[in-house]
Image: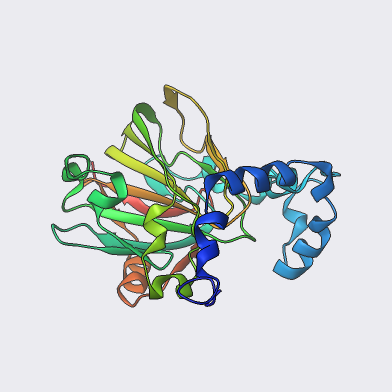
Amino acid sequence: MAALYGGRLSFLLPVISAPILSRLAGAFLDSPLSTPFIRGFIRKNNIDMSDYPREKYKSFNAFFTREILPERRPGRIESDPRDLISPADSRLTVYPIGGDTSFRIKYGTYSAASLLGGGDRAAAFAGGYCMVFRLSVDDYHRYCFFDSGRMGRRWRIPGRYYTVQPAALRTHDYFKENTRECCLMETDHFGTAACVEIGATFVGRIVNRDVRSFARGEEKGRFEFGGSTVVLLLEKGAAVIDADILENSQKGLETRVRIGEPVGRALR
């Protein structure tokens, strides 16, 4: 990795980070030729397959985007509608959004403006919270809507699929060039919120459902192979975040959360 970023193999970076390579890798992972990699991946990452239905997967991506057993994540439907629920199985860090605030997302540094692709888009969230839900390869890679509501504007920020390994940052903040799928949502309990899905190396597809309205806990989309991140931006006064999560975040620690698990509470 160090040789690739700033080292003797750095000349290969524009080739292996190009979107076309991610598309080719995605095509392979969609094919039956990729199935021999499933068993070793499960062992290496200690994935508990009892959370998932027993089935024979037709490709690695079919395995990677497998649906979880509903009874394994009951929180999506059992908690109070005013609870702020996690949209994904992930590691959560929460940042207050100030005028000059930056936050770390997989070794990259963002402001609200750079994350959304414009200061005008970010202005509404000043004084609110940025919630970073980091998924790793062993996590469940489908994510849900955290509240009911209506879909607003959607946009895509194209990028190259650079790695998020620390070695990459010795010469450049490569993560900012990753593809991002962004949307604004008018939610029933938290006002206007922004949601951003971010792909990393070899995540050739961020697959979001095309909906006008949505229910709390309803599936929003999925990531295909690779590490991934979901980011929520909330307005000032929209929610109070659980104290233990804020305390961990202030210490630079992530909090392990599950899809549908309450992580805060609506204030409106």
The residue that appears at 85% across and 55% down in the rendered structure is 36
Q: Position of residue 21 (x, y in %)?
A: 60, 48
Question: Does residue 109 lie above or below 262 as drawn?
Answer: below
The quadrant in which residue 49 appears is bottom right
The residue lying toward the viewer, choosing from 117 and 97, is 117
Check the image and name the residue furthest to the left.
99
The total of numbered circles placed on residues is: 0
The residue that appears at 65% across and 61% down in the rendered structure is 138
Q: Is residue 104 visible?
A: yes
Q: Position of residue 110 (x, y in %)?
A: 29, 59
The quadrant in which residue 89 appears is bottom right
State which quarter of the image contains the C terminus.
Answer: top left
Answer with left or right where residue 3 lies relative to residue 178.
right
The residue that appears at 41% across and 61% down in the rendered structure is 174
The quadrant in which residue 103 appears is bottom left
Q: Is residue 257 visible?
A: no
The residue that appears at 72% across and 47% down in the rendered structure is 29
Question: Does residue 92 lie above or below 235 as drawn?
Answer: below
- Identify the image's colour scheme: rainbow, by chain, secondary structure or one colour: rainbow
Q: Position of residue 3 (x, y in %)?
A: 54, 76
Q: Position of residue 179 (x, y in %)?
A: 44, 46
Answer with left or right where residue 95 lies relative to residue 225.
left
The residue lying toward the viewer, choosing from 27 and 218, is 27
Question: Does residue 222 lie above or below 35 as drawn?
Answer: above
State which quarter of the image contains the N terminus.
Answer: bottom right
